[in-house]
Image: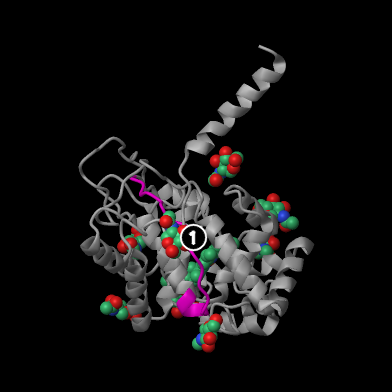
Amino acid sequence: MSAMAKYVLVLILAVLPALCKAQLKIGFYNQTCPSAESLVRRAVAAGFANNSGIAAGLIRMHFHDCFVRGCDGSVLLDSTPGNSAEKDAIPNLSLRGWEVIDAAKSAVEAACPGVVSCADILAFASRDSADLAGNVSYNVPAGRRDGRVSIQAEALANLPAPFLNASGLIANFARKNLTAAEMVTLSGAHSIGRAHCFAFTNRLYNTTTGAVRIDPTLSLSYGELLQSKCPANSTATTPITVRLDLITADVLDNKYYVALQQQLGLLTSDQALTTDPALKAEVDENAGRPNGWATKFHRATVRMGAIEVLTGSQGEIRRNCRVVNRATFASVAPAVGDVTGLASF
Ligand code: HEM
Ligand SMILES: *[C@@H]1O[C@H](CO)[C@@H](O)[C@H](O)[C@H]1NC(C)=O
Ligand SMILES: *[C@@H]1O[C@H](CO)[C@@H](O)[C@H](O)[C@H]1NC(C)=O
Ligand SMILES: *[C@@H]1O[C@H](CO)[C@@H](O)[C@H](O)[C@H]1NC(C)=O
Ligand SMILES: *[C@@H]1O[C@H](CO)[C@@H](O)[C@H](O)[C@H]1NC(C)=O
Ligand SMILES: *[C@@H]1O[C@H](CO)[C@@H](O)[C@H](O)[C@H]1NC(C)=O
Ligand SMILES: *[C@@H]1O[C@H](CO)[C@@H](O)[C@H](O)[C@H]1NC(C)=O
Ligand SMILES: *[C@@H]1O[C@H](CO)[C@@H](O)[C@H](O)[C@H]1NC(C)=O
Ligand SMILES: CC(=O)N[C@H]1CO[C@H](CO)[C@@H](O)[C@@H]1O
């Protein structure tokens, strides 16, 4: 065989798996469950009417699903005897909206049993949340299948900590093949929702001594206000929360970036976006162009929603989003001990 022929063969073999892997498709359930997306939407709207905070909860939950083992619904699985699941890791303690996903799944199962994955339901619910909180909608490619494994320690290892600086954030997203610009764009989700004190007391106090020490990248007056709300001894379960976007706390919009320009970012990881020239240029562009940011947010969310997805005959269609199906027991989750350290958040 000539060197050229060998080269072409190697190339084909390298590309083959990618060609065989099914792609996510818009309208994936057109034929098999035409009401799927509207049923999810109805459940999310009902949850939102009861508590508008669930929009933030569901957008964050989709992010946490995708960053740990890909978008496979693993964040939804409950812990089982001998295995602590992702949702019981420190970063997930404050996730909210589980009951909305359960309600959506029940409605979809009643209409078309065993067809629509929990991972897709979560991706649809995140889109519907963006629409309810930001009056902007987009098409969600679907066809994800559900995984059978959820491991607490993987949440700690993969999710970005709020204490990360610019280079740490860029590296964390690069591990998921997302660009620095996409990282800045997706951080705009922090234009809704809230954070617990523990996520940002590192900016208010010297964490070893507890002495007052306001991060120089944080507005001094805002830092003092935050100190009055958050004691230095706050822990992950201290129930005090602060809104992430000081300007328009409940609207998914570009005002988060305007706040960053005024040193009003809440988390180290928020304000870090203005400490690197390339990231700062993205922040300024997003602050100045609301529609431009919204379009980029949709694109980046669709890219995030395709991370390491299971498709075709991989995984399963879970009947209950909290537990794996019983029938086949091919893969058993490795038992992992409780992770009590706070190495990550
Ligand atoms: C860039 C790295 C990121 C870090 C370090 C980070 C960290 C955090 C932290 C610590 C909280 C507060 C949780 C709490 O204390 O209750 C939070 C909230 C939130 N995050 Fe992120 N996040 C990041 C990126 C993202 C992305 C990519 C999205 C979605 C696209 C997202 C969506 C949200 C939402 C909506 C909330 C509010 C949740 C609620 O109100 O229930 N975050 N994030
Ligand atoms: C489902 O229907 C929509 C609207 O007619 C169309 O845009 C989309 O391509 C269809 N998707 C599939 C997979 O058939
Ligand atoms: C409504 O929201 C509250 C929390 O704000 C929650 O405890 C309750 O379960 C929700 N009810 C429904 C029907 O979703
Ligand atoms: C939502 O957007 C549509 C068009 O994009 C507009 O007609 C409508 O007034 C907006 N609604 C709100 C509440 O902003
Ligand atoms: C960012 O954080 C990493 C790890 O904590 C550290 O090694 C690095 O020096 C920091 N970079 C900057 C620019 O502060
Ligand atoms: C990132 O891209 C590389 C090369 O295409 C691929 O091997 C890897 O699985 C991707 N990683 C993720 C998390 O998508
Ligand atoms: C916190 O306090 C200790 C002890 O006084 C000091 O060594 C350290 O530099 C302080 N850390 C910061 C970030 O100021
Ligand atoms: C935390 O500090 C506050 C005062 O700032 C004090 O009232 C409270 O008892 C402390 N809590 C714990 C658990 O130490
Ligand atoms: C909503 C949820 O599942 N929360 C769990 C998070 O983790 C703690 C501690 O591991 C559990 O007690 C919660 O039930």
Residue 246: image x %, image y %? Answer: 59, 82
Q: Amino acid at mark 1?
A: Phe
On the question of residue 224 being in view, the answer is yes
Q: In the displayed image of the protein, which residue is found farthest to the top?
A: 1
Q: Residue at x 36, y 83 (%)?
A: 49
Q: Residue at x 62, y 59 (%)?
A: 164
Q: Residue at x 68, y 71 (%)?
A: 215
Image quadrant for the N terminus? Answer: top right
Q: Say left or right for 163 vs 80.
A: right
Asked if disc 1 is less than 8 Å from ligand 1, the answer is yes
Residue 95: image x %, image y %? Answer: 41, 66
| Magenta-span inclusion, residue 179 | no
Q: Which residues are magenta?
A: 131-148
On the question of residue 207 being in view, the answer is no
Please give the residue where the numbered disc 1 appears in the rendered image: 63
Q: Nearer the viewer, residue 163 or 333?
A: 333
Colour scheme of this structure image? one colour
Q: Nearer the viewer, residue 263 or 324?
A: 324
